[in-house]
Image (cartoon, rainbow, N blue to C red):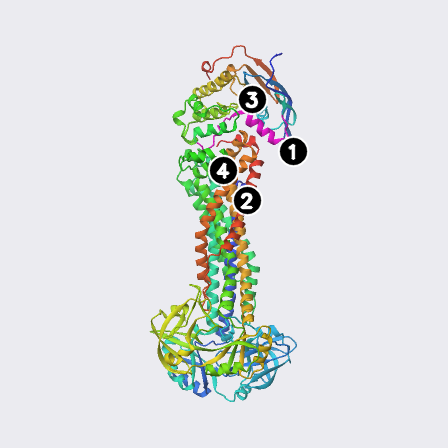
Amino acid sequence: MTDNRKPILRAINIKKEYRLGEVTVQALRGVNFDIYDKELIVILGPSGSGKSTTLNILGGIETATEGEIWYGREKLDWNDKKNLTLYRRKHIGFVFQFYNLLPGLTALENIELAGEMGNAPIDARELIKEVGLEKRSGHYPNRLSGGEQQRIAIARALCKNPDLLLCDEPTGALDSKTGVQVLRLIHDFCRRYEKPVVIITHNVDIAKIADRVFHFKDGTLESVDVNPNPMDPGDIEW
Amino acid sequence: MKQFRKNALRLAWRNKGSLLGSVFIIAIGIMTMVSMFDTLTNLKGQIQKLYKEHKLTDVFAQVYGIAPTELERLTELPGIREAGGKIASDVRLVTDGQEEIVTVHLMSYSKNDRVNLSSLTLDDGNGERVLPLGSEIADDNVIFLGTSMEKVYGFSPGDEIRLVIDGRSYRFTYAGTVNEPDYIYAMPPGGAMIPDGSTYDIAVISMNKMKSLMGSSNLTEIGFILDDGYEYADVKRKLEEKLQIYGLKSLCEKEHQASYQEMEGEFEELSSMGTVIPFLFMSISVFMLYVVLNKMIDRDRSLIGTMKAFGMTDTELMSAYMMQGLVIGILGALAGCIFASPFGRSMFDLYRSFYNLPDPVYYEPVISKLLAFFIAIVTSVAAVFAGIRGILGITPSMAMRAQSPKILGEITLPRFLTEHIQFMTKMGLMSIFRNPFRGFLIALAIGFPFAMSSVLFSYGPLINSVMVSEYDNCKAYDLEAQLDRYSSPAKVLDSAATLRHVQRAEPVFERAVMLRKDSRSEYSLLNGLQDGSELWKVLDNEKMEYIDIPEDGLLINERLADKLHVKAGDTVEFSIPGLVSGWRNVRVSGVLSETFGSRCYLSLERFPDVLGIDSLSDMLLITAEPGHFDEVKKELYDSGRVTWIVDKLKTRRTFSDMFRSMTVMVDVFNILSVIAGIILIYNISMINLRERTTELVTLRVLGTTDRELGWMLWFEMMVYFAAGILMGFPGNYFIRKLFESMMKTDSYVFRMRFDPSSAVYAFLLCGVISVIAWFLEIRLVKSIKLTDALKERE
């Protein structure tokens, strides 16, 4: 596939090996892809295919054994921990499967936390309104349902106005109705702020909302599907 | 069940650092308990054996002289089973290489002695041999010396020893050592409270020789064994009455005899230290075990829920965890018992250096070890039980759900604060306020070593200040010379005038007296001081001010007042055996607080009014002209009238040496409390940090820099540190009071004041430990892989 757009992020020949006792596991075997502005990418693949490893490497929370990640004109230096931290802080937003909200902070404070770190943060109160939880802003995470927690987690990720939003199984722990609500928030961010989003999931139905779908298998990017007519999250069901 | 237990043990192994820390703290508690218990058992056991075999009497008396036949007749009194006595006198000993006036309490020895039997150890050049009780001294010219003096001078068989009696010198040959049940603690005259083998000890020679030296066969130190069922009070009046005609100087029950009383005081002190110190350490280990197990079980909640769902009973679940408590208790007790042996031996050696003990062998009592195992197991199992009892009431579904974080509630930080502090500082503040229990545990872990160390560090300064107060401020003289008889103060001063290079001299009266109030009576030392004395100032160490001796009565110290249950303004009956016949009513005009002794004071000038006798003096306090101390001392040494010289600086050194030895023990406790503090602060910080792993890693993933995280943890640690130090102050007070009560004996009472410099040392020490703990926290946070923590459900 050829694309004349300028990629925001390039992954070149990414390899990742783990040592598990005496066995070396090849989690990624040379993966190449580009990510462009405004696009929503869904990564599909069975367990152990390398999709989570890819996401972690993209987010700078894991280092590759070989290969390069270019963010714009900047190449990530796997040995420079400080720079990796700044890369995450300035450019990346994360949404985790288990939300990872800070238990000692209220819903609003969790969102504000990310805002304090970003360069051009979005107003936390606006975001909590957008995710429909303004009435729950003073509540601690342990008093929120799973769906509410994930919505707060998304608001937190968006608050720092990241250049790239990475979502690791964001609906994995939610029922379908709540899952759709969560996908809508992610989708809206991508469209409204024209920022790229990468979602990894086991759920093939979610792929219907993507601009492109990456299919991972055995540590390789087996194929990339381009979706000319992505569906609205409200139209999908699982 | 077996598999679940195996799993619980494997999970426990993951917390091995914390659990080993608990084992170590238990070991510290057990070590102090066992070593003190064993030292006490050894000392007490050997001394009581000595008392029994050597027939220590129930009642002691000193008289000017009573014939053995007259003494024997006293056994006809109801309640008196056996009576016996010796001829005894303090005499000067002269030997090669001595630099001091050396005095021995010389006593007669006869194979026919019936009570307070002497044990002789013969040194014939081929090794030492303990002679059977009742052996005969065949040679009238041999002398046996107390073991302390023998150790100082290292006498060999055949060495010549001279005794000076009434100005004449008598030669003896050193034959070995002697132990007496009533002189285990050989207290020198002159108010000194510590045995000093270089200047004073006991000695025995044959009865025949003693009779010829003293020119009398009358016994002067006598004792009585009472019939079963009789007590001192039953025979006291009758004995007083009967002994008056023999010049009764003192009469007391065993419990008030100097050596016996001192030993009992030591036993009591050891016993309370052996209870209090282990109790402190055991409390800490229970606290730590509780925290460790509680957190560990919290982590196992879902596992416990699964097991409950499978049908495992609470008892089965509990027993798996209790097993861990059992293992920890056993390991702690085992380690404690192993460490206790060398520590106990060194403590026993310390005591041995002060006392004349016949059989200085250290035994290892089994009972203390059994007790140690019992206490360690019970406390650790109890701590485990306290940690897991919470899981008994919950259902499987509740156990499988993650426990909600314990949050105090929403707090709103003041606006001025949130606007002016960094975000991570705000995060730290929120973390502290929203999980106060976690903070409380860390603060407590800091507060304990601070409280303990700030008290233990103050021991050295305390001793120093006592020495300064007693020997620099109160006793401003250089030498104290005991004279051979009482004279008027003017005459004593006249004799001082003949000495050269004396800058100032003052006469003093000193004698054992008896005070009585209702049914209570106490022996005390009376010091008659001249008004406005400059060489002996009386200091109230509670008020820290010098007291003028009242004109209308006695000034007595608090300890004596407590024993007699009297206060200022009361009247007591007063007797000075040999000087004042019968009892006189004397007003107690003041009560003061003193560190040492059980004394009372009276103005020399007021003797005629208060006691009805002329002013008398038998002691001379002297300050030498600068640079002439040795000359004055030598002149006193050569004087025929001086029986005893107290060199103030030497006495001060002896006290300092004794307390320095004690300081070593205190330092050991200090080191142990610091180690306990390190283990506590480190482990509890780490346990709490592990609880927050996901939170901290999330922050890192979100882009928080190491510096920011480090600042947040630093801020939290400093707040906990400040809280811990604040909590440590009441702890300091509590431990000081405990130590005060432990160190209260009949010889001295220490008031442990708050010592700011010690608090600063303890503060710095805890600060360093906290900084190290913080540094290790940072290292731990950095070591956690970002991806690992994100896989876990919070």
Secondary structure, mark 2, is helix
- Label 4 and label 3 in one chain: no
- Give the label on residue A22, or none: 1
Q: Is residue B368 magenta?
A: no
Q: Mark 2 to mark 1: distance in Å?
A: 38 Å
Q: Do the residues labelled 4 and 3 touch (CB within 8 Å)?
A: no
Q: Which of marks 3 and 1 is nearer the N terminus?
A: 1
Tell which subunit mark 3 falls on: A
Q: Which of marks 2 and 4 is nearer the N terminus?
A: 4
Point out residue A25 in the picture as x, y percentages from the top left corner: 63, 28
- Give the label on residue B771, or none: 2
Q: Are marks 2 and 4 in contact (CB under 8 Å)?
A: no
Disc 2 or disc 4, which is closer to the eye? 2
In the displayed orientation, state which residue is furthest to the top: A228
Q: Give the range drawn in magenta.
A: A76-105
Up-down: is B428 above or below B336? above
Q: Mark 3 to mark 1: distance in Å?
A: 25 Å
Residue type of the residue flagged with mark 3: Pro
